[in-house]
Amino acid sequence: MNDMGSEVLGLETKGVSRRDFIKVCTTAAAAVGLPAWAGEKMAENVAKGRKPSVIWLHFQECTGCTESLLRTSHPDVGALILDLVSVDYHETLFAAAGRQIEEALEKALHENEGKFVLVVEGAIPEKDGGIYCQVGGKKAIDTLNAVAAKAGAIIAIGSCASWGGVPSAAPNPTGATGAPQILKGKTVVTLPGCPANPYNLLGTVLQYATFGTLPALDDLGRPKFAYGRVIHEDCQRRPHFDAGRFAQAFGDEGHRNGYCLYKLGCKGPQTHANCSLLDFCEVPGAWPVGIGHPCVGCTEQGVGFTVPIYTNLPVQNPTAPMAYPAIHPDHTVLGKSALAVGVGSAVVGAIVGAGVVATRKISADSEKTEGKE
Ligand code: SF4
């Protein structure tokens, strides 16, 4: 790809180099299990101005998924993610309000009918006719049905939109549920997580925009590239689990040494997600287990927000993996080593790990090379 990508997007003026631009696209491609050339193809498309139109609806939620998208540790990457897609309607990001924003939605629907990607964030209440969540005087359930009818692809981001999440926790006073339960008969890609990893979203959107396809999904609509394995299989604390080294209490010696958190209620053995392989906000180790808290199972319906946080669950896939990363107490509390990422990713697909490492290096590489470019 030539320099056009970053020039067209005006990224150079924001301090984003062509290198950063291609790396993010490649990482997004890797996140959905596509090869590097697919990332370059995505970048070319974006550079030609073919940015996927995204309409983003908010319902019952905390806006955490949007925050996760915006709060990348390297500010340029956050800007870059938003530059890669055309967010034509987003109630949190829009400066407009009232009639103006309603007109923006109508315009976006009209101009991109059948082509736009609908991203749903938040649960949808069904009880009492859905009166418990209304935006602009319209019920969430009605808005969702109307917008989804014109969408090219539908993505439910976060656990709330995927099955109801926090708002659906017992006693679920509003009858909160997820987009797939409302949009029966339609394909809804679900990206559960509290929050969902932005790269899982970006990769899915760019794949759809570039190739017109969606990633392979499991029975719950979750992309297999991200939710095909339980966290326990790729956790950097797994060697401690297999060796029988457990933290018994927060702050004890085992906890401080980065031992396995199973006895503190870790739900990693039953939770499908790629949290241990794809850093949040490009911060190494920035996921619950990485910072010393047991996984709460937020991506797993029936576990997250349902099973008490410190309750133990049976272990799925107890068999030890074929290879382990090197382990050292100093390296386990704050996250995985590059080797750990490499070994874990080799099992899932080396490409994902390469993308993760590439992303992590963006900041450092840019600082080193921008002066030379
Ligand atoms: Fe990691 Fe939790 Fe499994 Fe222990 S139980 S290895 S902390 S996922």
Image (cartoon, helix red, strand yellow):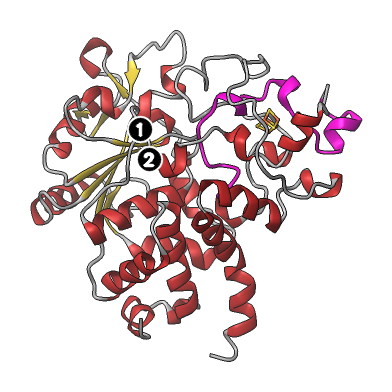
Residue, disc 2: 223
Name the secondary structure under disc 1.
loop
With respect to residue 265, does 198 lie above or below?
A: below
Q: Position of residue 166 (x, y in %)?
A: 47, 23
CB at mark 1 closer than 8 A to ligand 1?
no
Left/right of residue 200 with respect to residue 367 in the rendered view: left
**Rendering coords of residue 370 (x, y %):** 57, 84
Residue 246 appearing in the image:
no
Residue 231 lies in quadrant: top right
Residue 309 position, x and y percent, is 63, 19
Furthest-top residue in this view: 171
Q: Is residue 23 magenta?
A: no
Distance between the alpha carbons at the discs numbered 2 and 1: 6 Å
Q: Quadrant location of ligand 1?
A: top right
Question: What secondary structure is found at the residue carrying circle 2?
Answer: loop
Q: State the image coordinates of residue 88 (x, y, percent, origin top left).
A: 24, 55
Residue lying at 38% horizontally and 79% vertically, measured from the top left: 6
Q: Amino acid at mark 1?
A: Asp
Q: Which residue is mark 1?
A: 218
Query: From the viewer's perspective, is 186 left or right of 194?
Result: left
Q: Is residue 268 magenta?
A: yes
Span highlighted in magenta in the image:
250-279
Relative vertical location of residue 190 with respect to residue 151 in this rendering, above or below:
above
Residue type highlighted by circle 2: Pro
Q: Is residue 52 left or right of residue 350?
A: left
Residue count near mark 2 (Cα–Cα under 10 Å), binned few <14, some 14–19, many ≥20? many
